[in-house]
Image (tube, rainbow, N blue to C red):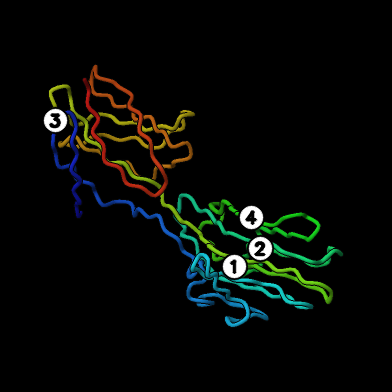
């Protein structure tokens, strides 16, 4: 098994703490060209094209997607696949909604669909009468782990007046479960082997249990980070102490737990 080393300094103790390469840790965006700087690369666009629908904003030196033409439906779509073992997934995007329509027949819509079955999992529709202009939308997609999904943005316009929407910064952030590598020491900085380690959430939910090895090390994997603070309970003989460690999704942590 390969090892990586993180240098940890604590109370004058400098030690090389090996991080065992077990779980894959990641925190990344899986949308391609979500800021439209490469125009419509990686997007499928119905009734729209790079010349008419990609706009360059000189004030901010950036591009964005603008949908909406009279008596047409314009729709942009990208397909993404979520990892089956993902811990947390969030979709977010910016949008500006503008309309001169007063009949409430036009609309902007967003939907999240299964790429294979076309089942709609999420759907939002905005009409001119909804009095919406600027929006920053975000959705928790964690429950769709392992699925291939279509992100669909569209505008429907009738013959009179026009509704447009500007879309930018489309991001789907995948974060793995977290991992914690710890070394258990006594008050004299001696490594404690075969110490029992139990990790729980604030509400008492058990996340991991195991023992330290001959070097006083343990590696806890697949840690959920819903409430960010974990209770790390270490016990060896008469020694017992609860430590608190704050974690976030998609991060590998290296800690020293020392009895004082």
Q: Residues within 10 Å of mark 3 (few under 14, many from 20)?
A: few
Q: Nearer the viewer, mark 1 or mark 3?
A: 3
Which residue lies at the image location 74% right of the left edge and 59% below the top edge? 126
In the picture, the disc for residue 111 is 2
Q: Position of residue 26 (x, y in %)?
A: 37, 55
In the picture, the disc for residue 12 is 3
> Left or right of 257: which side holds 127?
right
In the image, residue 199 above or below residue 130? above
Q: Residues within 10 Å of mark 1 (few under 14, many from 20)?
A: some
Q: Residue furthest right?
A: 103
Sooner in the amino-acid sequence: mark 3 or mark 2: 3
Labels 4 and 1 touching (C-beta < 8 A): no
Q: Nearer the viewer, residue 68 or 60?
A: 60
The residue that disc 1 covers is 150
Q: Which image quadrant for residue 242?
A: top left
Q: Nearer the viewer, residue 26 or 154?
A: 154
Q: Position of residue 34 (x, y in %)?
A: 51, 67
Give the alpha-carbon distance from disc 1 to disc 2, as whole Å.
8 Å
Sooner in the amino-acid sequence: mark 4 or mark 1: 4
Labels 4 and 2 touching (C-beta < 8 A): no
Give the alpha-carbon distance from disc 4 to disc 3, as whole Å.
50 Å
Q: Nearer the viewer, mark 4 or mark 3?
A: 4
Sooner in the amino-acid sequence: mark 4 or mark 3: 3
Labels 4 and 3 touching (C-beta < 8 A): no
Labels 1 and 2 touching (C-beta < 8 A): yes
The residue that disc 4 covers is 135
């Amino acid at each position: 098994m390969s090892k990586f080393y993180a240098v940890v300094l604590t109370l004058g103790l400098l030690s090389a703490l090996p991080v065992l390469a077990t779980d894959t840790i990641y925190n990344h965006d899986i949308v391609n060209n979500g800021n439209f700087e490469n125009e419509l690369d990686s997007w499928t666009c119905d009734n729209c094209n790079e010349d008419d629908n990609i706009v360059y904003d000189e004030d901010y030196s950036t591009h964005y997607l603008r949908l909406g033409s009279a008596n047409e439906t314009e729709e942009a779509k990208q397909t993404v696949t979520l990892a089956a073992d993902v811990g947390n997934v969030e979709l977010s995007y910016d949008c500006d909604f503008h309309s001169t329509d007063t009949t409430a027949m036009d609309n902007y819509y967003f939907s999240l669909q299964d790429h294979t079955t076309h089942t709609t999992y999420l759907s939002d529709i905005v009409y001119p009468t909804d009095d919406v202009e600027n929006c920053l939308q975000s959705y928790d997609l964690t429950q769709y782990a392992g699925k291939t999904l279509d992100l669909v943005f569209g505008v429907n316009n009738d013959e009179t007046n026009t509704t447009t929407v500007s879309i930018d910064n489309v991001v789907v952030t995948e974060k793995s479960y977290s991992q914690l590598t710890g070394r258990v020491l006594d008050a004299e900085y001696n490594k404690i082997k075969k110490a029992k380690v139990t990790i729980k959430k604030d509400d008492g939910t058990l996340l991991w249990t195991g023992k330290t090895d001959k070097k006083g090390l343990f590696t806890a994997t697949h840690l959920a980070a819903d409430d960010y603070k974990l209770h790390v309970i270490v016990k060896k003989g008469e020694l017992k102490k609860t430590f608190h460690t704050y974690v976030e999704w998609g991060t590998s942590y290296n800690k020293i737990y020392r009895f004082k």
